[in-house]
Amino acid sequence: MKTRPAAIDTQILLELVARVKIAAALESGVLDLKCPCGMAILPPTPVISNLKDRQRGLMKSRIKRHLQERHGLSDHTVRVILKEALPVD
């Protein structure tokens, strides 16, 4: 059962979307994605240009699993969040 108010959950999700957009825009360097709740979603992983689509898929699956397991969000809500954070190019 959730004990946090909805406003805090919304703030966490907005911060997560912003972090995902930054991580997805990287062309080089290291992907390192942490949820605003403090949990690591994706450990530091080097960005490899020819694997960028696969890395994007990995990031999406990790975010989806984290949001469903840790935050108890529905599949529909997670799809909406991912659509906002990782728009189709």
Image: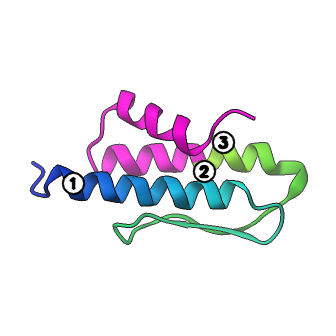
Which residue range is magenta in the image? 60-89
Helix, strand or loop status at disc 3: helix
Q: Residue at x 31, y 33 (%)?
A: 74
Q: Position of residue 85 (x, y in %)?
A: 55, 45
- Dot 3 amino acid type: Gly
Q: Which mark is residue 25?
A: none
Relative side of 61 to 73, left or right = right
What number is the disc on residue 59? 2
Can you identify the residue that label 1 sits on? Answer: 7
Disc 2/disc 1 C-alpha distance (Å): 25 Å
- Within the magenta stretch, is there residue 85? yes
Q: Nearer the viewer, residue 83 or 74?
A: 83
3 vs 1, front mark: 1
Give yes or no for residue 83 being in the magenta stretch: yes
The residue singled out by tag 3 in the image is 57
CA–CA distance in space, label 3 to label 1: 29 Å
Counting from the top left corner in percent of width and height, residue 1 is at: 9, 48
Q: Say few, some or many: other residues with alpha carbon within 10 Å of mark 1 (under 14 / 14 to 19 / 20 or more).
A: few
Corner quadrant of residue 88: top right
